[in-house]
Image (spheres, rainbow, N blue to C red):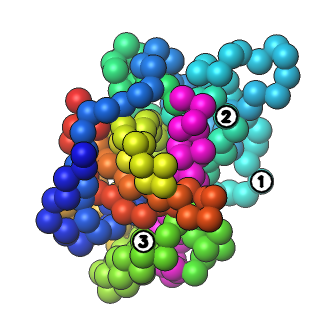
Amino acid sequence: MMRSRPAFSFIVVAALVLGACSGGDSSNGDPTVPIPTAGTSPNITTSTSTSSSDPPTGSTTTSTSPATSNAPTATATTTGGPTTTLVRPADLVTDPDDPNNLHASLPEHQPIIDAYVAAISAELITYSRWPLDPTSTELMGAPISDEMRSRENSGLVERTQLNQVLDISGGMTLRPYVVENDDPTRAFVWDCQIDATFWKDKDTGAKAPPDAWPNNGPPGVEVGISAVMVLVEGEWLLDDGGLEPRACE
C-alpha cells in the first residue's frame, strides 16, 4: 500500500513537481537484465523487437541513429518493447552488478514504463528551452494528466520568475521499474535516475543553488524518484511524483 507524504512544491529535474509519494517494496520485475551504459554522443535511442533474431522478452537491445535536431537526446532503462527517448544519458558510470542497473520490465509493465519515459523526456526538453512554455509541442503531446499539467504550470511560472532554465547537456539516465500495479488503473514507478542536469540563470549561466534537488550537473548523481501513473481511456499518464530515496536502495 502506498503512503502519502506531505506535499511540497519544487520542480525536480524530471519535472515531478508537487507531492512526494512512497511505496511498498512489491516489485514484480525480474532483476536480471543490465541496462545500457552511458553513450558518448547525442543520439535518439530506440529499443526494438521486430524480427525472429531479436532476443526474448526481458532483454534489452538498442539501435541508434543521428538526431534530426541539435537538441540533446536521453537513454532510458527499459526492456521488452519499443522506447524512444530524447535526452542523452549521463556520463556517471555505476557498477553493472548494482541492483539499480538490473531491473527488468515484465511485458505487462512495458506500456507503463514507456509512458513514464515519454512524459519525463518531454518535460526535460521543455524545461531546457526559454521561454519556459507549458504549452510546448512536446509537453502537450506527452502522456501527462490534467492535474499534473496544472502543477507543472505552477512550477514553470516559479522558474520563470527566478530567470532559470534547465541545462540538460550533461544528460539523464532513467532506470525505471514498476513496484506496484495491483490496481489495474493505477501504478507506481520507481526510478533511480542518474541525473547530470542543473538549473541555471538563463542570462549568466550561473548554476542555481540546490533547492530540494541535487542540481549538481555532470557527471551526475543518483536520485530516487517515485511516480504515480494512471490509466485513462486506455492510456497510461503521469499523474504525480516526487523524491523517493528507496528507489536507489
Question: Considering the image in quadrants, where does the C terminus appear?
Answer: top left
User: Looking at the image, is mark 2 or mark 1 earlier in the sequence?
Assistant: 1
Helix, strand or loop for the magenta stretch, by majority: helix
Residue 156 location, quadrant: bottom left
Q: Which mark sits nearer the N-terminus, 3 or 2?
A: 2
Residue 241 visible to the viewer: yes
Query: Which dot marks residue 68?
Result: 1
**Judging from the image, what secondary structure is the residue with disc 2 in?**
loop
Per the rendering, the mark at residue 128 is none
- Residue 139 horizontal side relative to residue 240, left or right: right
Determine whether the residue tagged by mark 1 lies in a helix, strand or loop.
loop
Q: Is residue 75 left or right of residue 49?
A: left
Query: Magenta stretch?
Result: 106-134
Q: Position of residue 166 (x, y in %)?
A: 42, 64
How many other residues sit within 10 Å of disc 1, few (<14), some (14-19) or many (≥20)? few
Q: How many marks?
A: 3
Distance from disc 3 to disc 2, alpha carbons, whole Å, reads 26 Å
Q: Type of residue at label 1?
A: Thr
Residue type at mark 3 is Met
In the image: residue 220, left or right of residue 65: left
Give the residue number, with chain letter if any, for mark 2. 81
What residue lies at 36% left-to-right and 31% top-to-bottom? 27
Residue under label 3, please give it.
Answer: 148
Could you say where residue 154 lies in the image, as x and y percent from the top left?
36, 82
